[in-house]
Amino acid sequence: MKIFFTILVFTTLSFSQKLPTKENSYIAKVGNVFISEEEFVTRFEFSPALHRKSSSVEYDKREFLISLIAEKLLSQQAQRIGLNDSSFYDGFSDIHKMLLRDELYRKEISQKVQLSEKEIQQGIREATKEIFLSYFFCEREEDAQFLYLQLKNNKILEIDSSFAVFTDTITVVWGEAEPSIEKTAYTTPIGTTSPPVFAGNGFYIIQPKKNQRSDYYSSLPPQSLRKQVEKILHTRKEKEYFEKYLQQFLKNKIGYSKPEIFTTLAKTLSEIFPHDTTSETLFTSENIHTAKQKLSLSLQDTFVVFQNKYWSLEYVIEKLREKKFFLSPAKNSYQIIGNQLHTYITVLVQQELLAEEAKNQKLDTSSAIKKKITMWYDAALATKLQMLLKNQNIDIEKYIVALAEQEGVETYDERIKNIEVTPIPMMTFRILGFGGRMFEVPFLEKHIEWIGIDTGKKIVP
């Protein structure tokens, strides 16, 4: 597809020194799209400043705005010429779903976490002391129960060869131990023995020996101590809510894969991956090509079915590449690969179900999520159009100025000057609810040369 453009002799661009009363949160208008102060500040502060050379923040702000205007012009043009087709949405859907899952996490989990004053005060009291204790560890619950009765009754231990126990001493520091261990350590009186408590991959019996002052927590100012305690308590309660929600949400939801096709994929991957790896091995594009060749006759077969959806073998293979499926260091066999594959597919299915739940709750209609989706959508469309222009050897800067003259651009200088931004740029990853991470904001391609193209008028002041 060829794209043609014409540089107009006269410009339809204008700018305003006075803000319109109804759009007083906007700093620019590009065609029929407004650039908000919120989007500008967020993207300016969370974007890497690879091309910022000036010591003047005002100069950097102006350059960034010019590039952002260019992105909006390209995005609108991409929509007009139909680049937002089904193939675009297929690629963009992952970003959309990640944002939806993150919004669901906030609604169902993080926003529901509340701390009482009683919890905070108890946390502060416990944080200022440490517990020195001895413990016994057993993998099997029956062994731990037997040992507990022996210790409780002060009996001499009678242990046969089948009994496995490990014992040691440790100092429990509040906020650092497994919550179940910590709770038992702080609630079991000194000199007594606790019942078995499950943690990690086994059962612990605890015998507190003495309390001692925590040098770290005791040295903190009261406000700093409170903040630190609140942070730890909030994180723990959020994890607890997360586990409960996920357990309830996945209840009665069934997904399955035919053993034959699952085993075939696992065996094929075992042939592709090294059999003895000392480091993580990534599923690459080359692996993809080899796997598809070996499985060419089965690519359209159904691999996994859940709810009202099904994924083909080819779809799953592509997902493994997109989600960076890798093998941990091991002597790989198809059984080992099969176990890792099972875990990976299970997580992918769970994430798909959670995204569907967010859609069912209409979370994509909230203003907060709409803003995020629109920001990423515009950036993705602009990138797609730029790739097309480059492939056709079209001068992108001239193309942008033609769009600017055609669509019209207004900037609201007073508000731009009054915007305060952090001069230190950050490239920030965002850890998403229900797993995954992404950049906080999409990368903004630098486009400022179009402003200097002579069309008879100054496009942006």
Image (cartoon, rainbow, N blue to C red):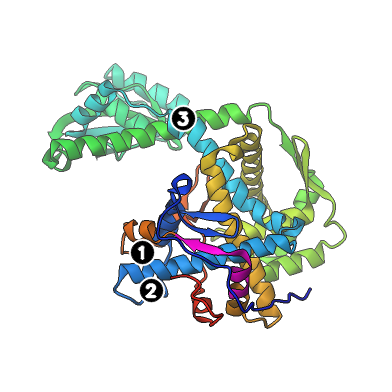
423 lies left or right of 252: left
Q: Which is nearer the eye, 256 or 266?
A: 256
Q: Distance between the residues labelled 3 and 1?
A: 34 Å
- Mark 3, secondary structure of its residue: helix
**What is the crowding at mark 2: few (fewer than 14 residues within 10 Å), some, or many (at least 20)?**
some
Q: What's the residue type where badge 2 is placed?
A: Arg
Residue 96 horizontal side relative to residue 178, left or right: right
The numbered mark at residue 425 is 1
Range of magenta residues? 401-411
- Disc 1 marks which amino acid? Pro
Q: Residue at x 54, y 80 (%)?
A: 456
- The answer to which image quadrant residue 57 occupies is bottom left
Within the magenta stretch, is there residue 407?
Answer: yes
Estimate the spatial distance between the alpha carbons at disc 3 and disc 2, rounded to whole Å: 43 Å
Q: In this view, does 95 lie to the left or right of 23?
A: right
Secondary structure of the residue carrying numbered label 2: loop
Place of residue 232 in the rendered image (x, y in percent of width and height, measured from the top left): 31, 37
Q: Which of 460 and 309 is in front in this view?
A: 460
Q: Residue 29 carries which label?
A: none
Q: Which residue is depicted at the point 26% across and 23% down?
A: 117
Q: Image quadrant for the C terminus?
A: bottom left
Q: Which disc, if any, is residue 52?
A: 2
In the picture, the disc for residue 241 is 3
Which residue shows up at 31% across the image and 27% down it?
A: 183
Whether residue 449 is visible to the viewer of this picture, yes or no, is yes
Q: Nearer the viewer, residue 88 or 1?
A: 1
Q: Position of residue 77 (x, y in %)?
A: 67, 64
